[in-house]
Amino acid sequence: MRVETLIRCHQNAFAYFGGWPRKILCDNMRQVVVGPDRINPRFRDFADHHGFAVRRHRPYRPRTKGKVERMVHYVKDNFLNARSFTGLDDLNAQGRAWLVTTANVRVHSTTGERPWDLLAKEELTPLNAITPYQVVHCVQRTVDAEALVQFERCRYSVPVSYVGQRVALDARPGSVLIRSKDCILAEHPRAKTAGTRVENPEHVRERWQRSIAPPAPPPRQGCIVTFGDEVQHRPLSHYQEIAS
């Protein structure tokens, strides 16, 4: 799972609950934790944007680990077990119905209260408190011989002068930005179908002009005299000796 996927999962959860809490307890997954005391910079940026603290569970402490993972087993045993789905939309619809009728209204064995009642006491930061966080997937690519950059089985055009160079591609939900360091080379709408070529007409024109051979120069006018052998240079005394 990429960090972008984990961030979008959090965004979906925030949208469902109507906000986010002051702190979130996370498992020691590599998308969150990259060192003993170091949070993944991209996830840290997401947390800082929303202002919540990232709390990682203590390694080798089953009690904390259970708090993070017990909900997974509950969903598997109580919701997924013995159910069938026609697709993702059907799964999501049944899941939302299960939350409303079962999960959120049951009396929790640890708290002794219904989760839906406790949600009101969380004092979540509302969704409209800040501007939405933009999820960006950044990768490095080499521009191919056709001045195209490949990403997720689609190709995007750049100026032909960057053929063979290494560029950065920033993929957002609806757009793709290609840059060389701080210079923006191109911005395209993100393709929705694999195998699509998304090209700027100006880039196509540049590539076409480069592919045309330059015209041959016109023939020279007038009489052209050339010598096949190099003219020898001799002193005049040589000819005087022959004449005498």
Image: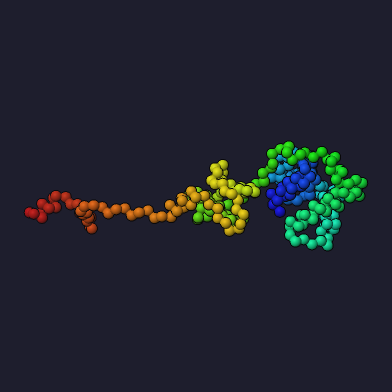
Residue at x 80% of width, y 54% of height: 95
Residue toward you, 244 or 12: 12
Please state the horizontal and vertical placement of residue 203, each as a whole percent of the image. 49, 50
Residue toward you, 3 or 122: 122
Residue at x 50% of width, y 55% of height: 146
Please state the horizontal and vertical placement of residue 31, each as a whole percent of the image. 72, 49
Count the labels in the image. 0
Please state the horizontal and vertical placement of residue 114, each as a whole percent of the image. 88, 46
- For the N terminus, give its image quadrant: bottom right
In the drawing, does residue 59 fall left or right of residue 221?
right
Residue at x 54% of width, y 42% of height: 183
Please state the horizontal and vertical placement of residue 82, each as a whole percent of the image. 83, 62
Specify the farthest residue to the top: 129
Residue 220 visible in the displayed image: yes
Residue 180 visible in the displayed image: no
Residue toward you, 231 or 176: 176
